[in-house]
Amino acid sequence: MAIHKILRRSLSGEKRSTEVPKGHLVVYIGESEKKRFVIPLSYLNHPSFQELLCQAEDEFGFHHPMGGLTIPCSEDLFVALTSRLSRV
């Protein structure tokens, strides 16, 4: 599945790599248990992704408990959104 190549998700039990490819960003997704995703920076320009960023700002302000950008949405919603964005 192409989305797995784009997202490069690390499971919570695995050692997390500190290396992020150039032009990508780490985000933490989930409402209770957070999962780490690596996404292209270009996603930040899409209005639907910007809506998620507004939700993150409303919930966390500029303090993100995971140390990175935390977005409070379900993993299924995030994967569906990024699947659509990868086709644009």
Image: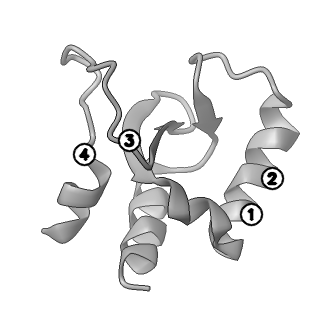
The residue indicated by pointer 3 is 37
- Asked if the residue at tag 3 contacts the one at tag 4, i.e. Cβ–Cβ closer than 8 Å, the answer is yes
Residue 42 image position (x, y, % from top left):
53, 64
- Asked if the residue at tag 1 contacts the one at tag 2, i.e. Cβ–Cβ closer than 8 Å, the answer is yes
Counting residues from the start of the chain, the first of labels 4 and 3 encountered is: 4
Q: Label 2: state its secondary structure.
A: helix
Residue 54 disc label: 2
The residue located at (24%, 45%) in the rendering is: 8
Q: Label 3: state its secondary structure.
A: strand
Query: In this picture, is 45 found above or below 71?
Result: below
Disc 3 marks which amino acid? Phe
Residue 59 image position (x, y, % from top left):
81, 36
Residue 1 image position (x, y, % from top left):
12, 68
The residue located at (79%, 29%) in the rendering is: 60
The residue indicated by pointer 1 is 51
Counting residues from the start of the chain, the first of labels 4 and 2 encountered is: 4
Counting residues from the start of the chain, the first of labels 2 and 3 encountered is: 3
How far apart in space, not on screen, are marks 2 and 1 (Cα)? 5 Å
Instruction: Mark 1 vs mark 4: give the one in front.
Output: 4
Query: In this picture, is 37 found above or below 87?
Result: above
Instruction: Mark 4 vs mark 2: give the one in front.
Output: 4
The residue indicated by pointer 4 is 8
